[in-house]
């Protein structure tokens, strides 16, 4: 999936791969993104690492699995199970996009780099809360489901 952080963003971002376990880092996963700034001749790779403990806490707070499961209720059981198996990876990708956007907002030098799991901890928690509709929409879009975020049956009180 390709993504521009916002309409005025000078960056074009594409998910390269992930989430994958980080070598020598227990309980940390990483997604790798290709990032290209309009003024650069070539893009860079950015590895975005997130502790699985933080991912779990964010998921519990936002009730992402529950919200996505509700949206998948119209599917046949086998299709729904296949989709639900993909939700944790897609959730990690969406949260990684949010963390990468934090770095992009601060400016990104033109070199391959890593955003460690211990960077942007509290900022990421708040960013994901602020962008929770994006997170659910990202997952549903990747599952080829049309996200219906107008429903009031999914309260977002934390």
Image (cartoon, rainbow, N blue to C red):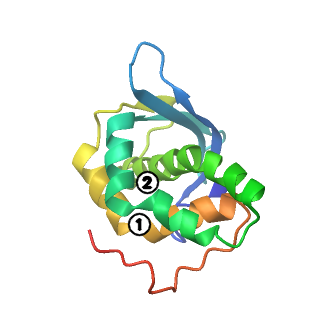
Residue at x 26%, y 52% (from the top left corner): 123
Across and down, in percent, residue 35 comes to: 58, 44
Q: Residue at x 28, y 74 (%)?
A: 157
Residue sitting at 49 percent across and 67 percent down?
Answer: 67
* For residue 142, side relative to residue 113 (left or right): right
Instruction: Assign a secondary structure to mark 2.
Output: helix
Rendering coords of residue 45 (x, y %) = 57, 34
Image quarter of residue 142: bottom right
Query: Residue at label 2?
Result: 98
Q: Quadrant of the C terminus?
A: bottom left
Check the image and report above or below for 23 versus 141.
above
Q: Which residue is mark 1?
A: 131
Please indicate, yes or no, whether residue 141 appears anywhere in the rendered image. yes
52 or 131: nearer the eye? 52
Task: From the viewer's side, name the closer residue of 84 and 37.
Answer: 84
Vertical placement of residue 120 versus 2, above or below: above
Q: Is 52 or 22 nearer to us in this picture?
A: 52
Side of 3 where 129 appears, left or right: left
Disc 2 and disc 1 in contact, CB within 8 angstroms: yes
Q: Quadrant of residue 69?
A: bottom right
Tell me which residue sits at (55%, 64%) in the image. 68
Question: Where residue 19 appears, x then y in whole percent?
Answer: 56, 35
- Mark with earlier residue (2, 1): 2
Seen from the viewer's position, the closer of residues 92 and 62 is 62
Question: Circle 1 — which element?
Answer: loop
Real-space CA distance between mark 2 and mark 1, rounded to the nearest whole angstrom: 8 Å
Query: Furthest residue to the left?
Result: 122
């Amino acid at each position: 999936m390709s993504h521009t952080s916002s309409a005025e963003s000078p960056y074009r971002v594409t998910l390269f791969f992930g989430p994958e376990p980080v070598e020598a880092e227990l309980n940390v996963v990483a997604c790798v993104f290709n990032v290209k700034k309009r003024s650069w001749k070539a893009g860079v790779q950015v590895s975005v690492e997130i502790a699985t403990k933080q991912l779990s806490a964010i998921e519990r707070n936002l009730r992402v699995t529950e919200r996505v499961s509700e949206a998948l209720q119209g599917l046949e059981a086998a299709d729904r199970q296949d989709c639900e198996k993909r939700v944790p990876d897609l959730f990690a990708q969406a949260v990684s996009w949010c963390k990468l956007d934090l770095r992009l907002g601060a400016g990104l030098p033109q070199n391959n780099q890593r955003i460690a799991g211990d960077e942007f901890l509290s900022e990421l928690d708040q960013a994901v809360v602020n962008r929770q509709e994006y997170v659910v929409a990202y997952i549903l879009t990747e599952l080829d489901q049309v996200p219906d975020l107008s429903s009031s049956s999914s309260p977002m009180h934390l």
